[in-house]
Image (tube, rainbow, N blue to C red):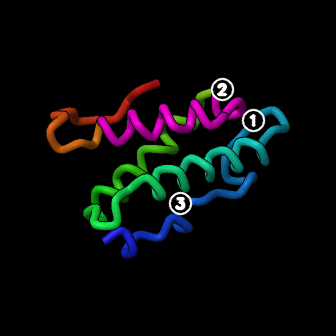
Amino acid sequence: MKEFVSVYTYLVEPHEVGEWEGEEALAAENLNRLYHAVYDAADDDIEPGLLEEMLSAVWPHWQFNPQLLELDDDLTDAFVETLFSHFDPNAGQDEFDDH
């Protein structure tokens, strides 16, 4: 059911990410990279609402996180793994706040 969610709804442009001391393009590129990583990691049969919740959790986590400008594959993988662990129905957590 993943196909019912469009990752393009979440992607951002540099003018949408706020002030990143002249690095807005990099911040937007890395944020979009995270959105794609979360979407790509989701199973095809994921509930659309769950995937939307997960994608919606990306921006609040990274909005003021300076590591966004230093994003690499390891950090991306760690974030995606943490996000999926949090949203595991057996985890029992209410909010995603890992920053």
What is the C-alpha distance between the residues marked 1 and 3? 19 Å
Main SS, magenta region, reads helix
The residue indicated by pointer 2 is 66
Find residue 46 and report its image quarter: bottom left
Query: How many numbered marks, from 0 up?
Result: 3
- Packing grade of label 3 (10 A; few <14, some 14-19, many >=20) is some
- Magenta stretch: give its range: 66-85
Residue at position x 73%, y 38% from top? 19
Identify the mark nearer the N-term, 2 or 3.
Answer: 3
* Quarter of the figure with the N terminus: bottom left
Is the Cβ of the residue at disc 1 closer than 8 Å to that at disc 2? no
Instruction: Examine the structure image and report whether residue 67 is included in the region drawn in magenta.
Output: yes
The residue indicated by pointer 3 is 10
Residue 65, disc: none
Identify the mark nearer the N-term, 1 or 3.
Answer: 3
> Can you give x and y, in whole percent of width and height, for residue 75 in the image?
57, 31
> Can you give x and y, in whole percent of width and height, for residue 50 in the image?
28, 56
Residue at position x 34%, y 35% from top? 96
Disc 1 residue type (three-letter): Trp
The residue indicated by pointer 1 is 20
Provide the secondary structure element on which disc 2 rests: helix
- Packing grade of label 1 (10 A; few <14, some 14-19, many >=20) is some
Disc 2 residue type (three-letter): Pro
Provide the secondary structure element on which disc 1 rests: loop
Disc 3 residue type (three-letter): Tyr
Q: Nearer the viewer, mark 1 or mark 3?
A: 3
> Can you give x and y, in whole percent of width and height, for residue 25 in the image?
79, 48
- Packing grade of label 2 (10 A; few <14, some 14-19, many >=20) is few
Q: Residue furthest bottom?
A: 4
